[in-house]
Image (cartoon, helix red, strand yellow):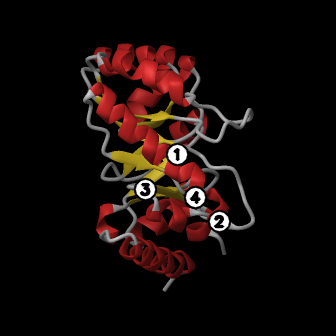
Amino acid sequence: MSTIAENLAGVRARIQAAAERAGRRGDDVLLVAVSKTHPPEVVREAMEAGLTTFGENRIQEAKAKIPQLPGSLHWHFIGHLQTNKARDAVELFEMVQSVDSARLAAELNKWADRAAKTLPILLECNVSGEHSKFGFKPDEAMAALPEINRLPRLEVHGLMTMAPFFEDPRDTRPVFRALRELRDRLQQQHGIPLPQLSMGMTNDFEVAIEEGATIVRIGTAIFQG
């Protein structure tokens, strides 16, 4: 068994255990393997170990990498996306998890319309209040959701956040809980279903799952040697 396969087995076991602690099924959590900086041959090894969904955070790297890999793989964009890269994002990815402004949403909608494509998105929300993080503040998300939801080529599937790094992953719990509670308020106020919560990375994904994550974005725990 390769190192990636061994790592993946461990990650999947931890996802299953965290889901069970929350009274959920492990299969209800989508694992997005963060493949940024890893060359196509490493992604191919991960694919052979059973991974199907990968996350990239730089358009230029993705443009070079994705065409070298099988078309059966699923690609999510998870990094900060500049509006001038929206066209490439629409062409390369089947979900953009990091929509952080109504302007970006409008640009994605424009290029999705030209491609005759429907693009699932998540709204990136900054619930921790860190100045270094991108994303809607909670009140901004409340105001922007109806406008973005009206864009005909976009489907808002839920919310995404990045928690601050803590030595003790349990310290991230209030951040993940805040995103879940924001999602619940948005659903209640606007009547728009938002089933997906993308939150949790290598250091804290188990806490995120306990707080309701349906998507986790994990790189280091899978690809480390």
Q: Earlier in the sequence, mark 3 or mark 2?
A: 2
Tell me the distance, in whole angstroms, between the alpha carbons under discs 3 and 1: 12 Å
Which residue in the protein does label 2 denote? 169
Please state if 110 lies on the left or on the right of 84 as rendered. Answer: left
Q: Amino acid at mark 1?
A: Ala
Q: Do tag 4 and tag 2 residues touch (Cβ < 8 Å)?
A: no
Q: Residues within 10 Å of mark 3 (few under 14, many from 20)?
A: many
Q: Do tag 3 and tag 2 residues touch (Cβ < 8 Å)?
A: no
- Residue 177 percent coordinates (x, y): 50, 52
Tell me the distance, in whole angstroms, between the alpha carbons under discs 3 and 2: 15 Å
Q: Tell me if residue 117 can be seen.
A: yes
Q: Name the image quarter holding residue 171.
A: bottom right
- Residue 47 percent coordinates (x, y): 41, 65
Which residue in the protein does label 3 denote? 213
- Residue 139 percent coordinates (x, y): 52, 24
Q: Amino acid at mark 4?
A: Arg
- Residue 53 percent coordinates (x, y): 40, 55
> Which callout, 4 or 2, points to the residue nearer the camera?
4
Q: Earlier in the sequence, mark 1 or mark 2?
A: 2
